[in-house]
Each structure stands twice: as C-alpha cells, then as structure tokens.
Image (spheres, helix red, strand yellow):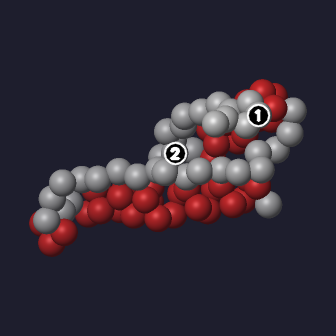
Amino acid sequence: MWIGDNRAFTLDISDSTESMQNLFTDVQKAFSQTPSCVVNCAGITRDSFLLKMDENDFDQVIQVNLKVGDDFVSQLLF
C-alpha cells in the first residue's frame, strides 16, 4: 500500500556537490518541501583482489561507497 505521493530520483553521486544540490532543488519543487526521508543506496564495485586493485579504483570505491553519500546528503539536509 502506498501512502501519499512517492517518486524516485536518480543521481550520479560521484559527480559533484552541485548535482546533489540540483537534485534537492528538484525534489523541493516536486513536493514543495524538503525531503523527510532519504534512501542512500549509492555504491560501486571494482572487481579486483584488494591487494591488486589499482589505487585510483580503490579511492573511487571508498569515495562513493563510504564518503560521498553520507557526507553530502547530511550537509544538504542539516
């Protein structure tokens, strides 16, 4: 059962803070308010054994999976 008006929005979270701000602006326009709930399911994988993984790939995985989503979303909401 769905309650209220529900929509999904997508975003390339590795892009930039500006793209996240644009997303929140779009959400506010669609609902006329700041979101009361945000689901962050951002994540990427680079299939490689950790010790053989390229440093750039490792940095990107950590940036997207651990840092970007939580940090940026928290800054935009609070």
Residue bearing mark 2: 13
Q: CA distance from mark 1 to mark 2?
A: 26 Å
**The one of 56 and 42 positioned closer to us in this rendering:** 42
Label 1: element kind: loop
Q: Quadrant of the N terminus?
A: top right
- Between 26 and 52, the one lying in front of the other is 26
Q: Quadrant of the C terminus?
A: bottom right
In front: mark 1 or mark 2? 1
- The residue to which callout 1 is attached is 4
Residue at image x 51%, y 45%? 13
Q: Is residue 27 left or right of residue 38?
A: right
Above or below: residue 56 compared with residue 3: below
Which amino acid does the dot numbered 2 rest on? Ile
Extreme-front residue of the structure: 1
Q: Residue furthest top?
A: 30
Instruction: Tell me the crowding category of disc 2: few under 14, some 14 to 19, or many 20 or more residues within 10 angstroms, Cα based.
Output: some
How many labels sit on residues?
2
Where is residue 28 shown, x and y percent of the image?
80, 35
**Looking at the image, can residue 27 be seen?**
no
State which quadrant residue 10 falls in: top right
Percent position of residue 40, x then y: 55, 52
